[in-house]
Image (tube, coloured by chain):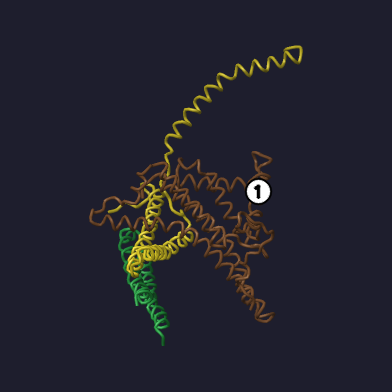
Chain colours: A green, B brown, C yellow
Amino acid sequence: MDPAAAKLIGAGLASIALVGAGIGIGTIFGNYLAGALRNPSAAPGQFANLLLGFALAEATGLFGLVIALIILFVF
Amino acid sequence: MPDPMHQFEIKRLINLEFIGLDASFTNSSLFMVIAIACIAFLTIWGMRGRALVPTRMQSVAEISYEFVANMVRDNVGSAGQKYFPFIFSLFMFVLFCNMLGMTPYSFTVTSHIIVTFALAALVFIGVTIIGFVKHGLGFLKFFVPSGVPVALLPLLVVIEVISYLTRPISLSVRLFANMMAGHTMLKVFGAFVVGLGLIGGWAPLAFMVAFTGLEILVAFLQAYVFAILTCIYLNDALHMHH
Amino acid sequence: MAKTAKGRAANRTRERNQKIPAQDDKLADFDERLGRAKGRRSDPPEATARGNAMGTAFRISSELVVGLFVGGLIGWQLDKWFDTSPVLLLLFFLLGAAAGIWNVIRVALEMQSNAQNADGASKKPGSEPASR
């Protein structure tokens, strides 16, 4: 197949990494909610860890998106 | 299946031209005029009686006034009182444009990115100018977060500037995407109802009823979020703490 | 009793004017109390989409996506200007992602502090059971 089509298919496949980001963010927030409902007074203390976990989960998903962009524009 | 995107087409009603640019009176302009007429009717006719114990229309006008006044006071403080007319006009315009779009055979003005972008750009440029007028060049200190090691400072300033520049785009895209997606969904499920006919059409019809209710809520909510974000950005410009 | 209507009107006016000093005192007292109450009321703290979770949800989701988009847009435009390879596009895409995540974190922190303020305001001293 010609390279242009291969690039587009490659970019599409690389974007599947965002599935992992979605699952990761959902897991982190779900666990935070479950813990907060069990022990509401301890919840604000862990809020910082929640945001940290969210940022890291999002970041790994975005790496996949960066690779998609590299495939599209660099090669 | 009929085309769900057909409802967003701009139709020229009266052909006009202004210095070579197309300034026709379109269906979009018509519905903007209708929205302004409704707002003017509500506020002017409703407040004609000026009764101490309000009539129904006066009550609606007073409720909308108080709602926006509370929003401005809670989010901007007393320094924001002089921007109340602008925020009130903005909120009522977006609200009525959204709500008018829910009536059958109408056109939703805010489902076009150019309209929402014009409003968002107006807010963004206005708020930035207010910030510079009030604080002079000290407004640039807004982009320098406090308590940060000097080595990281250039990177963080660039990130802060980028996050400031996302404001008009997120304002406009949020309103545009919600309105367009909502109305497209309404049309698609409407087509399902007709397509499945008398036998199977009840299920999508029930969904349509619930979804129309949701869309009315979203219409109000998007106007509210637009206005409250304008208040927050105004507050950031007037009182510069993050 | 005055004999004419004009006389009765004059009597009424005189009585009203005599009552006014007492009312003046009450008004002055009210003005003073109003002034003190206004001084107590300070500007309320900043608030995000207070109480409206769905509004905040719309805001957060759009902030994240738009951050990426704006970063990419700026990077692409700078690339066309300086004619570099898509290095700037990728760099600004990452910066835009960081800006988007930073906006989300900022909104979440404001929501958190609002929730804590609301909690702290509603809790009155002595309403919690004494600890051992």
Instruction: Using the rendered view, name the quadrant where residue C73 is placed.
Output: bottom left
Instruction: Using the rendered view, name the quadrant where residue B50 is placed.
Output: top right
Q: Position of residue A32 (x, y in %)?
A: 35, 66
Residue A45 vertical position relative to residue B89 in the rendered view, above or below = below
Q: Determine which residue is flagged by label 1.
A: B42
**In this image, B39 relative to A45: left or right?**
right
Work out whether residue B159 or residue A30 is closer to the camera in this orientation and state it: B159
Q: Position of residue A33 (x, y in %)?
A: 38, 66
Q: Position of residue B98 (x, y in %)?
A: 59, 59
Element at label 1: helix
Q: Residue furthest right?
A: C4
Residue C29 vertical position relative to residue C116 in the rendered view, above or below = above
The mark tally for this picture is: 1
Say which chain tag 1 marks: B
Is disc 1 surrounded by few (<14), some (14 to 19) or many (20+) residues within 10 Å? some
Residue B46 vertical position relative to residue C88 in the rendered view, above or below = above
**In this image, A21 relative to B35: left or right?**
left
**In this image, B140 relative to B173: left or right?**
left
Instruction: Using the rendered view, name the quadrant where residue C88 is placed.
Output: bottom left
Q: Position of residue B19 (x, y in %)?
A: 60, 54
Q: Residue furthest front?
A: B20
Instruction: Check the picture and name the quadrant holding the C terminus of chain C.
Output: bottom left
Work out whether residue A47 or residue A65 is closer to the camera in this orientation and state it: A65
Examine the rendering and report whether any part of residue A15 can be seen: yes
Instruction: Check the picture and name the quadrant holding the N terminus of chain C.
Output: top right
Work out whether residue B160 or residue A33 is closer to the camera in this orientation and state it: B160
Residue drawn at 51 percent across, 46 percent down:
B70
Examine the rendering and report whether any part of residue A38 can be seen: no
What kind of residue is marked 1?
Leu
